[in-house]
């Protein structure tokens, strides 16, 4: 009988973060085309879906009461109020990484900055150590703040909320003034393919060095 291979070392968790307008969804779309068997963690959010968003694909949409009841039942690995919206990640969604799965986790900056702390608090030492060995955190940056605002207005259309944009931008800037991410890739306008290529190079370098 052929001996079963242990593929657990092939798994990794790619954390993609960035300010609103950084192009996270566009980069993710290209990564799914380029990386075979890449799976996305679908997080929870308490806002209404945008016109092009699908429940269970882009987010698990819930109302605030449902979300807070899940918090009370301790169902989340982590959760935060980002701008006016509660967001969170279910406990069970991370564990596939330890089974050899390639997983991408798209979260906002405040949550990405506390990934290591979250794993240490929520998992036993052997599990959080294995998860951190397999975790790659990439900040998608913007060439300037005007680019961010322009992209968000184009994305949201009539639903653009200036107060929400300023609130999130301020929240993100405060985190970035106190935390430096593992990797930063600037997503320049019109250079999406280059951005994606740079992210893939980071993944490959980390896998070789592991």
Image: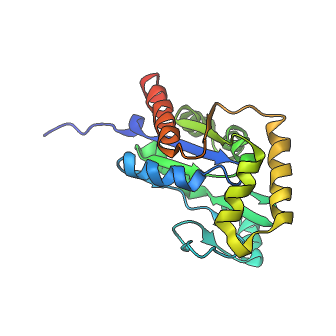
Location of residue 94 in the rendering, given as x and y in whole percent from the top left corner: 55, 51
Snapshot quadrant of residue 9: top left
Residue at image point 83% right, 34% down:
178
Judge whether residue 78 can be spotted in this image.
Answer: no
Rendered-image quadrant of the N terminus = top left
Location of residue 130 in the rendering, given as x and y in whole percent from the top left corner: 54, 35
Closer to us: 159 or 171: 159
Closer to us: 148 or 88: 148
Q: Is residue 77 above or below residue 121?
A: below
Residue at image point 36% right, 51% down:
37
Snapshot quadrant of residue 83: bottom right
Residue at image point 86% right, 57% down:
167
Q: Is residue 44 above or below residue 209?
A: below
Residue at image point 59% right, 44% down:
15
Q: Is residue 154 above or below residue 9?
A: below
Judge whether residue 129 can be spotted in this image.
Answer: yes
Snapshot quadrant of residue 119: top right
* Residue 150 left/right relative to 9: right
């Amino acid at each position: 009988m052929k001996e079963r291979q242990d593929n657990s070392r092939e798994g990794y968790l790619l954390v993609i973060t960035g300010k609103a307008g950084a192009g996270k969804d566009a980069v993710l779309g290209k990564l799914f085309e380029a990386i075979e068997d890449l799976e996305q963690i679908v997080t929870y959010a308490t806002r209404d879906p945008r016109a092009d968003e699908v429940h269970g694909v882009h987010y698990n949409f819930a109302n605030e009461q449902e979300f807070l009841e899940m918090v009370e039942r301790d169902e989340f690995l982590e959760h935060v109020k980002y701008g006016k919206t509660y967001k969170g990640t279910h406990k069970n969604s991370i564990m596939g990484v330890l089974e050899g799965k390639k997983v991408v986790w798209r979260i906002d900056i405040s949550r990405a900055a506390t990934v290591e702390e979250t794993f240490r608090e929520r998992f036993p030492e052997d599990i959080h150590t294995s998860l951190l060995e397999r975790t790659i955190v990439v900040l998608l940056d913007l060439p300037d703040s005007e680019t961010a605002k322009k992209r968000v207005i184009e994305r949201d259309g009539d639903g653009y909320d200036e107060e929400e944009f300023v609130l999130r931008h301020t929240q993100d800037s405060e985190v970035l003034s106190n935390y430096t991410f593992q990797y930063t890739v600037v997503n320049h306008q019109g250079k999406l393919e280059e951005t994606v290529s740079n992210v893939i190079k980071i993944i490959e370098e980390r896998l070789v060095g592991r």
